[in-house]
């Protein structure tokens, strides 16, 4: 079981589906798209290959995607393929670089908060850089940043 939600602030819309998988994702948008169009989508199930159903992505049409993966948890090739094939996606952010998918599947390094592949006791040395989302008070734009890297991009909220 998992809980998901759509957060709305003015025109801005964010979707987090928790750990729902491919078959449940499809039910969110068929036969009726109950989620509607989304500005920022946080990948379901950490970006495992059993999530990021192309039907969901086409229906919610996110502009930005944030993958809440670990270096070896989630971030699988199938999810990357679906995300990169979605025509609406302008940017993909990742909490960690994925070491379970081909290197070229990952987002550009400036969009990845943590690049290290630390395991076991070494994992405690992870810098734990985070991705921050801020919505303008009028809801007409939003900024995604990785403060530790000095990265910041502002996007316009889609008129939906």
Image (tube, rainbow, N blue to C red):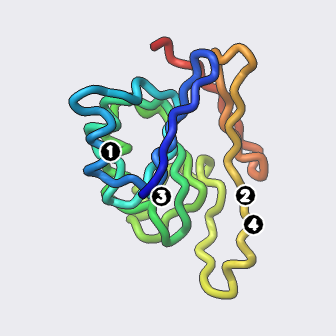
Image: 7 above or below 12: below
Tell me whether circle 2 and circle 4 mark residues in contact (CB < 8 Å): yes
Q: CA distance from mark 2 to mark 3?
A: 17 Å
Tell me whether circle 3 and circle 4 mark residues in contact (CB < 8 Å): no
Query: Which of the two discs, 1 and 3, labels the residue nearer the N terminus?
Result: 1
Query: Which of the two discs, 1 and 2, labels the residue nearer the N terminus?
Result: 1
Image: 1 above or below 90: below
Viewer-side label of 1, 2: 1
Q: CA distance from mark 3 to mark 4?
A: 19 Å
Viewer-side label of 2, 3: 3
Circle 1 sits on which residue?
Answer: 25
Neighbourhood count class around disc 3 (C-alpha, 10 Å): few under 14, some 14–19, many 20 upward: many
Residue 90 coordinates in the image, percent (x, y): 47, 32
Neighbourhood count class around disc 4 (C-alpha, 10 Å): few under 14, some 14–19, many 20 upward: few
Residue displayed at 65% across by 61% down: 114
Residue 42 coordinates in the image, percent (x, y): 51, 44
Viewer-side label of 4, 1: 1
Circle 4 sits on which residue?
Answer: 127
Q: Label 3, secondary structure: give it.
A: helix
- The quadrant in which the N terminus is found is bottom left
Residue 84 coordinates in the image, percent (x, y): 36, 43
Circle 3 sits on which residue?
Answer: 46
Residue displayed at 66% across by 36% down: 144
Neighbourhood count class around disc 2 (C-alpha, 10 Å): few under 14, some 14–19, many 20 upward: some
Q: Which mark is residue 129?
A: 2
Left/right of residue 49 with respect to residue 103 in the rendered view: left
């Amino acid at each position: 079981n998992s809980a998901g939600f759509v957060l709305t602030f003015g025109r801005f819309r964010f979707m987090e589906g928790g750990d729902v998988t491919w078959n449940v994702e499809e039910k969110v948008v068929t036969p009726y798209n109950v989620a509607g169009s989304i500005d920022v989508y946080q990948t379901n199930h950490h970006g495992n290959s059993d999530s990021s159903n192309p039907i969901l992505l086409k229906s919610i049409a996110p502009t930005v995607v944030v993958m809440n993966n670990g270096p070896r948890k989630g971030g699988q090739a199938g999810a990357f393929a679906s995300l990169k094939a979605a025509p609406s996606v302008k940017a993909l952010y990742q909490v960690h670089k994925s070491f379970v998918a081909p290197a070229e599947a990952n987002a550009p390094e400036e969009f990845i908060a943590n690049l290290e592949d630390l395991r076991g006791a070494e994992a405690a040395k992870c810098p734990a850089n985070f991705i921050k989302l801020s919505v303008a008070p009028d809801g007409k734009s939003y900024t995604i940043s990785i403060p530790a890297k000095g990265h910041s991009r502002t996007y316009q909220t889609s008129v939906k």
